[in-house]
Image (cartoon, grey):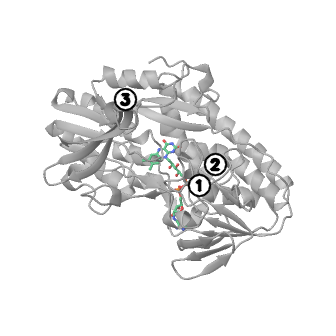
Amino acid sequence: MANPISRRTFLKATAGGLVVAGAGIGAGYYLNKENIKGKILIIGGGAAGCSFAARLMHRLKNPDITLIDPSDRQYYQPGFTFIASGVFQADEVWKPQSECLPKGVKWVKDSVVALDPVKQTARTAGGQTFTYDFLVLTPGLQLNWNKVEGISRETLGTGNAHCIYDFEGAQKTWPAIQEFVKKGGRGVFTDTYTKLKCGGAPKKICLLTEHWARKQNARKNVQIDYYCCSDALYNVPHYAPRLIEIYQERNIGLELKTRVKGIDTLTKQVHLEKHETKKVKEFDEAQGREVEVEKKIVTPFVEDYDFLSFVPPQSAPDFVRESGLSWTEGSLAKDAWVMVDKETLIHKTFPNVVSLGDVAGIPTSKTSSAIRMQLPVAVQNFIDVMKGKEPSKKYNGYACCPIVTDYGHVLLAEFDYNKEADITFPFSLLDMSKEQYLAWVLKHDFLKPMFFHGMLNGWM
Ligand SMILES: Cc1cc2nc3c(=O)[nH]c(=O)nc-3n(C[C@H](O)[C@H](O)[C@H](O)COP(=O)(O)OP(=O)(O)OC[C@H]3O[C@@H](n4cnc5c(N)ncnc54)[C@H](O)[C@@H]3O)c2cc1C
């Protein structure tokens, strides 16, 4: 693949750019601190909640911020794919939460179990109740392990069935991939039918396994198949043709509209269902003749595997579903995603609530790169609301999904709500409908430090 800018030049240029940008933003924020009063509660201090808190600390004078989160650790979850493919060590992708949350924020190490937006209260598992004037709802999403029969989070790895969406699961995956490639056999890779964080991740681990087999001169020993729940491998037109071409070039079997129902870890068989809409002929009593109707047909089948990668269905956390803050109709209602305006990220019925990140019910990808673009909009609109004003900023749905296609290349899919390519500099200088080495450099060398030192600190 052509590489017009050397790795060294890129590293230097970007590092310089980041320093300049960081210094500029910082100075601006410190000079303009606002004196607005109100009790702010943040639920969830992950990529979205921690970064939001940091930005509020930059923007407000002595703010009253309480953040509830049970986790000791702040994970850089995009690194899970790289743990599972032997690129990162497990300890490289997390930091103690105490080092990440901004000073001045009161951290309550507990889980919210009930939220009442009318009374403006949140109750925790530890039995405390917190009141708020303004709420930042950022608890991420819930992995519903119980919706895959035959396996649980605790039994991950049993029967060589693996999942990279879990920190421990990702660690078990890498030795299993190496062993699978050494021994040979059939690798079955799957995704899930709900909205999921980083929809590219299941494809990345499939493509990296295929490349690993080639690197080990063992490709002829392994069969690799990908079962995709959607009716297309990728739904952003600018990037989809090349991704499909890569699957074809690399002889990876592709079956669409297929979801995992369960796993038999003893026999190493995965139970799948093909969900199709088909035209069938039916006798219509009223018309007294056969007519053609569209019917949803579910066809169950079973496949043997030697190595399996699966993804649990995902939804908003239960306490969000029960809070009355979720969508009640439309495609985002079933899994209880939070009913925010897709441009302002302010809740549609409770204007003192903002939500962003994975839990937000907006029609874009659930990635931390999307959160990076949601943050300035959500923070400004939240401050507008605190001041009694209308939200002034709009989010265009930007998300970025770096689909790692091999050890050295990434198909960097950047797009907006309209599923149109929204390519940022310097990538706008390249043909980003194809995988690029420069995008690998970004993913491999830059995104993790940008996350821990830029985004979580509220600087980018
Ligand atoms: C395998 C994998 C690969 C990925 N790859 C990429 C990628 O390449 N690029 C990219 O941009 N993104 C990627 N992502 C997605 C990215 O990690 C998420 O979109 C991002 O972390 C979401 O941030 P969030 O703050 O909404 O949720 P999280 O970061 O998950 O944080 C949620 C926080 O809320 C807390 N919480 C949960 N429940 C409660 C409760 N009841 N009460 C209080 N606190 C609670 C949690 O402890 C956690 O700290 C990937 C994710 C995975 C799993």
Q: Is residue 301 left or right of residue 334?
A: left
Classify mark 2 as within 8 Å of ligand 1 or not, answering yes or no.
no
Looking at the image, is mark 3 or mark 1 earlier in the sequence?
A: 3
The answer to whether residue 64 shows anywhere in this view is yes
* Mark 2 element type: helix
Q: Is residue 60 left or right of residue 328?
A: right
Residue 174: image x %, image y %?
Answer: 29, 46
Residue 12: image x %, image y %?
Answer: 61, 32
Residue marked by disc 1: 327
For image coordinates 60% across by 28% down, the residue present is: 420
Label 2 and label 3: CA atoms lie apart by: 57 Å
Label 3 and label 1: CA atoms lie apart by: 34 Å
Q: Nearer the observer, disc 2 or disc 3?
A: 3
Q: Is residue 134 left or right of residue 365?
A: right
For mark 1, does the 10 Å Cα neighbourhood hold few (<14), some (14 to 19), or many (20 or more) residues? many
Query: Between residues 190 and 282, which one lies in front from this camera angle?
Result: 282
* Labelled pair 3, 1 in contact (Cβ < 8 Å): no
Classify mark 1 as within 8 Å of ligand 1 or not, answering yes or no.
no
Residue marked by disc 3: 292
Label 1 and label 2: CA atoms lie apart by: 32 Å
Question: Which residue type carries mark 1?
Answer: Trp
Query: Between residues 6 and 68, which one lies in front from this camera angle?
Result: 68
* Mark 3 element type: strand
Residue marked by disc 2: 454
Query: What count of labels does the image hold?
Result: 3
Task: Give residue 48's quadrant in the image.
Answer: bottom right
Query: Between residues 344 and 11, which one lies in front from this camera angle?
Result: 344
